[in-house]
Image: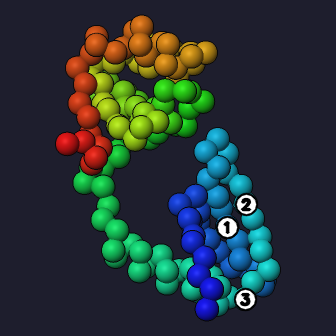
Amino acid sequence: MKLSKLDLSNVVAIAHSEGHLQLLLDLGNELEFLEIPAPVEAFEGLQHLNEIVAEVKALPSYEESIAMLPTNSSMANAVGYDDDKNILQIEFHNGAVYQYSGIEEDTWEDLHQADSVGKYFNEKIRGKYQSERIDDDYC
């Protein structure tokens, strides 16, 4: 028996139709749809694997209620904004997720549309608003 290491973390969804395994992959800045000829058993096997992994892997302790948008930034993977609560959420490249309170919608729009998200963040947000780290890796 030959074992192969798998990383299925980019697989968003799977389906099976007319003899093809269908995969939706998250490539970071876009989604890609693939069709691979495969029996329905391949689809069923992946579903079963997902059930096993889901039982073992604990979900994060916080609910990500803020919709996150991927960003092309050397500082952050994604940014999001809750306009009801005026909270900016940033997922940094190191995995840390922070929420910033009291962010006006204009500031959010300026950040989201900035040529450099990191530069705008450092000049207009960092150290000027109350923040809280919310990811699980925080000690």
Q: Circle 3 sits in a helix, a strand or a loop, which is it?
A: loop
Pointer 2 local density, CA inside 10 Å: few below 14, some 14–19, many at least 20: few
User: Which residue was labeled with disc 2?
Assistant: 33
Q: Position of residue 102 (x, y in %)?
A: 27, 18
Q: Find numbered disc 1 in the image and state the secondary structure of the residue it sits on.
A: strand
Near-viewer residue (99 or 82): 99
Please say if the residues under marks 1 and 2 sit with CB atoms less than 8 Å apart: yes
For residue 131, the mark is none
What residue is pinned by disc 1?
23
Badge number at residue 39: 3
Mark 1 or 2, nearer chain start? 1
Q: Nearer the viewer, residue 18 or 28?
A: 28
Q: Tell me where residue 99 sits by quadrant.
A: top left
80 sits to left or right of 96: right
Tell me where residue 83 appears, x and y as whole percent: 37, 27
- How many C-alpha atoms fall within 10 Å of the one at disc 3: few (<14), some, or many (≥20)? some
What residue type is disc 2 on? Phe
In the image, residue 102 above or below residue 135: above
